[in-house]
Amino acid sequence: MTNQEWLYATKPTRGTLFLRTFLPYQMWRFLVLNLKMIGIIRRSHGGGE
Amino acid sequence: MSRIVVLGAGVSGHTAAAFLRRWLSKRDEVIVVSPQPTYNWIPSNIWVGVGLMGKEQVTFPLAPVYRKANIDFKQARAVALFPEGKGVDPQPLVEIEYTAPDRSGGHELVKYDYLINATGPKLNFDATPGLGPGKNSVSVCTADHAVEAAQLLAEKVERMRRGERQRFVIGVGHGGATCEGAAFEYVVNLEFELRARKVRDKADILFLTNEYEVGDFGVNGVHINRGGYVTPGRIFAESLFAERGIRWITKAHVRGVEPGLAHIETLDKGLGEVEFDMAMLLPPFTGVGIRAYGRDGTDRTSDLFAPNGFMKVDADYAKKPYREWRAKDWPRFYQSPAHKNLFAAGIAFAPPHPISEPHTNAEGLMISPAPPRTGMPSAMIGKAVARNIADMVSGSPGPAHAASMAEMGAACVASAGANPFTGTAASLTVFPIVPDFERYPEYGRDTDATFGEIGLAGHWIKILLHHLFLHKARMRPGWQWIPE
């Protein structure tokens, strides 16, 4: 059994793939992602407010 | 003086025990009962399963950590609960059976004032004939399973280097399984490793899942605010598979596994077969099978535990259709309604219902994910239960610190390839974990707090979390400041 959905799936552009491992951009994202996750953790510990 | 017994030393039980020791006085006693002598940071088993880490990098012995922390450790499994006491003695107790080599098979009755059931699940490989280690597939549920998976993968890589084509089937091994996120991580890590070992062109990789759509992850999927659209997580999950040449089959139940052949059934295409050279299929979970008895020996298991073996807590277990599920159905304090000194934390508590919309086949078998209760929510529940017990020991009339999965978010980092420069991971947050359509009518979640992206930064975070959480679990200096 196989499916064909994969033929129609969204695929990333070369630019998107490049940014995924482009060090200066990823250092910035590291900072942003950490802040976002800390925000979720703080909100969760606060009972969802 | 109070005695608190914690059954289980996984993420939830270990977190609860550590905080109990910190919050209770020295006169109070904390006892951990766990059948395994080691702690296992399970999220990193994925990397063990592809051969990037050894077992010793994701496990450590519990006894020295507990000895130093003044926590009594019994390497044993819980067999039976006597929450009203036994015979003429009204003191609650739990019967345990030792698994430590020097006392293997020996039984002991351990009295308690408060008990936390944090045993985690029984890995129910028997639900699917032929499934599991020692049979026809591998798993990464435990460190030992992951080591076995890595050995099999290495063997397959050697075959590919000799020019043989190999077929990999990765996913879940039953229609009612959970942990689709772990299977997702394993399949993309395996694909990354095959590329790194320069044999990718010899591999056919298939993801086999009980999810209605990939990216469901047992939480009814997510909607992510990205690029000017609120986009279903399915788009990103399918994209990741498509760019890596991984095919997928959704809505699938595995009816049986033979050597090299999985018999499957899908909701939309009926019966079928999938051939493989290596299958990593995760099992469904049940409770570990603790029995419960009244003082006179009456079997009270069905009063305390749901039919799937997980412990009933302060949830609304009334059966109702999907459209009537509410966020408030989910427990807030994880306290047994039958006994105020009995709690369940982590996977051990019985969820009121799934989170994903359920689907069944013609025979009534559910083919959709069971709700995940691992990682961050598991630890947060363990900590909240510990806080409530510490308060009750100090005289508080009942629990006040809630940790409902419908009121907390989760941050999840799913590795998609481990390399400090070329690796990636999907960083995902959802808020709340259980959709609350009364509070967030459109998607059930706060789309400002639910996001996801793939990149190298996620891999760095994943590495950071691996070391931070092992540091925390080892109760090394400052452990209490590392968030769950």
Image: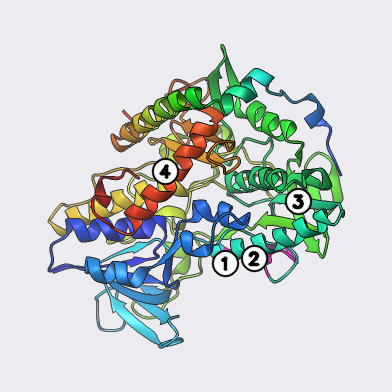
Secondary structure under badge 2?
helix
Which residue carries the number 4 mark?
A: B464
Pick whichever of labels 4 and 2 is earlier in the sequence.
2
Labels 3 and 4: the sequence-earlier one = 3
SS for tag 1? helix
Q: Earlier in the sequence, mark 4 or mark 1?
A: 1
**Location of mark 1 (residue):** B144
SS state under label 3: strand
Check if residue B111 falls in the magenta segment: no
Both labels 2 and 1 in a single chain: yes
Q: Which residue, given by chain and number where applicable, does mark 3 sit on?
A: B169
Disc 2 to disc 1, C-alpha distance: 6 Å
Q: Amino acid at mark 3?
A: Val
Please name the residue shown 40% across and 61% down the image.
Answer: B118
Does residue B79 appear in this view? no
Q: Are marks 2 and 1 in contact (CB under 8 Å)?
A: yes
> For the magenta stretch, what is the residue range?
B123-133
Q: In this orientation, which residue lies closer to the viewer: B252 or B421?
A: B421
Mark 4 near mark 1, Cβ–Cβ under 8 Å? no
Give residue A9's mark.
none
Residue B309 visible in the snapshot = yes
The amino acid type of the residue labelled 4 equals Leu
Query: Dot 2, crowdedness within 10 Å: few (<14), some or many (≥20)?
Result: many
Image position, residue B422 (x, y; %): 59, 36
Tags 4 and 2 touching, CB below 8 Å: no
Residue wearing tag 2: B148
